[in-house]
Amino acid sequence: MGEILGLGMTHYPPLAGRDENMSGILRGTLRDPAISAEVKNPANWPPLMQREWGTDQGKAAAAEHRQVLVSGLDTIRSVIDEFRPDFVLIWGDDQYENFTEDIIPPFCILAYERIEAQPWRLKAPGMPGGANIWAEKEDHVSDIRGHKDGAKFLASGLITEGFDVCYAYRPLHLQGIGHAFLNSVAYLDYHRRGWNHAVVCFSINCYGRRVIAFRGGASKFGDTPDPEKLDPPSPSPGRCFDLGAATARVLKDSPYRAALIASSSWSHAFLHDKAWRMYPDIESDRALYAALQSGEYSRWRDTSLASVEASGQQEMLNWFCLAGAMAELKRKPSWTTFIESYVFNSNKCFAIFPP
């Protein structure tokens, strides 16, 4: 019988950059001419947003934000090390990186033997364009061990369960893996002490209608493209939830110790118009967080795709997979923390569901 550890974390790209650049997404939004000067005026912002922005465009608040995020990441890492998994499975979004015009699979297990990537040459969405926090050079190589046998076992089991998941033995358009996965590993080794856990990347088409039409989500406020030019939708939250439940069933009957990680921030400011692309959908995130804490998983499974898209929660489809797995195992989190932020594009959440 397998053993399963459930975890949730963020792969927030600006964390890889310097504090003075962490509010860069908001600064770009403030240059959008479609947003009125009244909305852009800090005097009209919510109080927490004003405090985060301060007199230095968020630099001091960025240092505090970094400290809280790194503390959460350190907690997750210590639990992984103590669990000693055979592999770490990461549900992450592919944001027009490995999957582009030639194929967009709803779900794809990357059954790689080894992953070698140069993260600072990928120019991935949201990643810092200048110096990174570790001062790593452009030719730096991230060398990550995969677990092909575990990935094949999971793919076989899910297909038997009725989920026709895709799988791949080598990258399609990247030398390596997308930023959701690379950042997750990089942040879990934030202090650069070494990472020796095998990784299975499980790619989810979170961006759906925007994955090609908007190259993974980027657009200006008020963009209203012809619906016919948008892409087909992503898998629904309910389908992702059920996929997570099936993943738990397959791995529960496996010979493996597996850590299951949902990796993403929550609602993204640049993905919804409720707050003029300025800050995330705080209220919608709070509602799902409360349901996660209490184990009210029906609230998660019954969430509509329209609601997710309207709130900029597309990347949270990774968390819907985790919620489904934990519902299947009848687990509630032993520890969670929710970090609200207006200036830094998204709210962040960490969670631990012990075996």
Image (cartoon, rainbow, N blue to C red):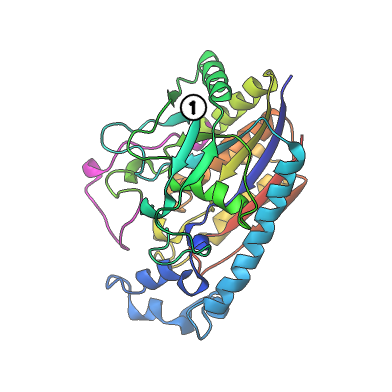
Query: Is 237 a magenta residue?
Result: yes
Foreground residue among 313 and 252 = 252
Q: Residues within 10 Å of mark 1 (few under 14, many from 20)?
A: many
Question: Disc 1 designates what residue?
Answer: 111
Element under disc 1? loop
Foreground residue among 338 and 252 = 252
Query: Is 338 a magenta residue?
Result: no
Quarter containing the C terminus: top right
Which residue ends up furthest to the top in the rendered image? Answer: 160
At a point 41% along the width and 66% down the height, the residue shown is 25
User: Is there any visible trace of residue 65 in the rendered image?
Assistant: yes
> In which quarter of the view is residue 68 placed?
bottom right
x and y percentages locating residue 281 in the rendered image = 51, 59
Q: Amino acid at mark 1?
A: Ala
Q: State left or right for residue 225 relative to residue 167.
A: left
Q: Which region of the structure is painted magenta?
A: 217-238
Q: Which secondary structure is most common in the magenta stretch?
A: loop
User: Is there any visible trace of residue 47 in the rendered image?
Assistant: no
x and y percentages locating residue 158 in the rendered image = 54, 20
> In which quarter of the view is residue 145 placed?
top right
Foreground residue among 304 and 150 = 150
At a point 56% along the width and 21% down the height, the residue shown is 149
x and y percentages locating residue 222 in the rendered image = 30, 61
x and y percentages locating residue 341 in the rendered image = 56, 66
Q: State left or right for residue 71 relative to residue 89.
A: right
At a point 33% along the width and 55% down the height, the residue shown is 218
